Amino acid sequence: AGKLALVTGASRGIGAATAEALAREGAHVILVARTASALEEVEDRIHAAGGSATIAPLDLIDGTSIPKLAEAVRQRWEALDIMVLNAGMLGSLTPVEHLDVKEYGRVLATNLLAPQALIAAFDPMIRKAERADIIGITSSVGSKPRAFWGGYASSKAAFENLLGTYADETEHAARIRVHIVDPGATRTRMRQLAFPGEEPEKVKPPEVVAEFILGRVLSDVPTGELVRAPDA
Ligand code: NJP
């Protein structure tokens, strides 16, 4: 209770479910995504459940939004206790030789450069927390290549490495815990884009991943661990 959490990609899917779970535990949650109307709906649900949240509608890859966000947060709060680096972009599933450099650039910017910029901008506030939890949402294809997934998978592989590195570098600051979370197949818009033929009911709802993340944040676990959410 009383913690400050920031969740990217909080307008739907895994991010929205995680934001709601953190708010239920008493955290004040800053909801980040581009779609203001969808963020407002999540904020309304949080308020209706007795929780508290603030929306921050912005595009994480426009080059200016992240330092501005950090400045605005710093004006209201001292420390950031929880940061969920969840916003992600799939891009086209295509052979490596056909990756479109512009789209691939957006995938890298969303999945790799924006999380790094968030860590950079919020690190001073993270270090002021009594205990800080940084949760990065990666993917199984980041650890194991899969045909046609090279654009997305390479961004997640690099993100996974970056999180592990941040965990190493902050290990001496025993209060900072980095969690590298592979959600596994989850019923979201991204999953539908990747597997349009799949019946949504066949995969778990995002609430399962959210509860898993909450469990990590509430328990004593080592920093830098790569963990996978359960399948049901
Ligand atoms: O996806 P989706 P998930 N600036 O598409 C936001 C990983 N994952 O919940 O901006 C700001 O429903 C977007 O909001 P909006 C996956 O790689 C999933 O499945 O309003 N926000 C939305 O809230 C990702 O890292 C599965 O459009 C931006 C959110 O990101 C994480 O799980 C499996 C943005 C995406 O929500 C959540 O994905 C796996 C920007 N530029 C890994 N761009 C799975 N679902 O099965 C996007 O291994 N967003």
Image (tube, grey):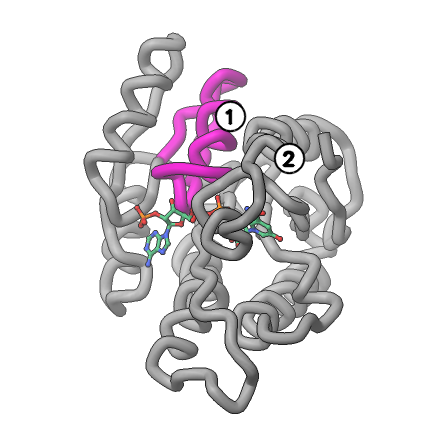
**10 Å crowding of disc 1: few (<14), some (14-19), many (20+):** many
Position of 175 with respect to 73 (left or right) is right
Could you say where residue 142 lies in the image, as x and y percent from the top left?
66, 66
Question: In the image, what residue occupies the spot 59% across and 76% down?
Answer: 150
Looking at the picture, which amino acid does disc 1 mark? Answer: Leu
Question: In the image, what residue occupies the spot 33% across and 81% down?
Answer: 102
Residue 86 seen in render: no
Q: Give the range drawn in magenta.
A: 1-30
Question: In the image, what residue occupies the spot 24% across and 51% down?
Answer: 58
Residue 29 seen in render: yes
Could you say where residue 3 lies in the image, as x and y percent from the top left?
48, 27
Q: Classify residue 60 by image quadrant.
A: bottom left
**10 Å crowding of disc 2: few (<14), some (14-19), many (20+):** few
- Tag 1 residue: 22
Q: Of helix, strand and loop, which one carries label 1?
A: helix
Could you say where residue 15 lies in the image, as x and y percent from the top left?
46, 39
Where does the C terminus fall, quadrant-wise? top right
Residue at the left extreme of this rendering: 37
Is the residue marked 2 within 8 Å of ligand 1, measured from its CB?
no
- Tag 2 residue: 202
Mark closest to the chain's N terminus, 1 or 2: 1
Could you say where residue 61 lies in the image, as x and y percent from the top left?
31, 65
Position of 177 with respect to 136 (left or right) is right
Mark 1 and mark 2: span between their CA atoms?
A: 26 Å
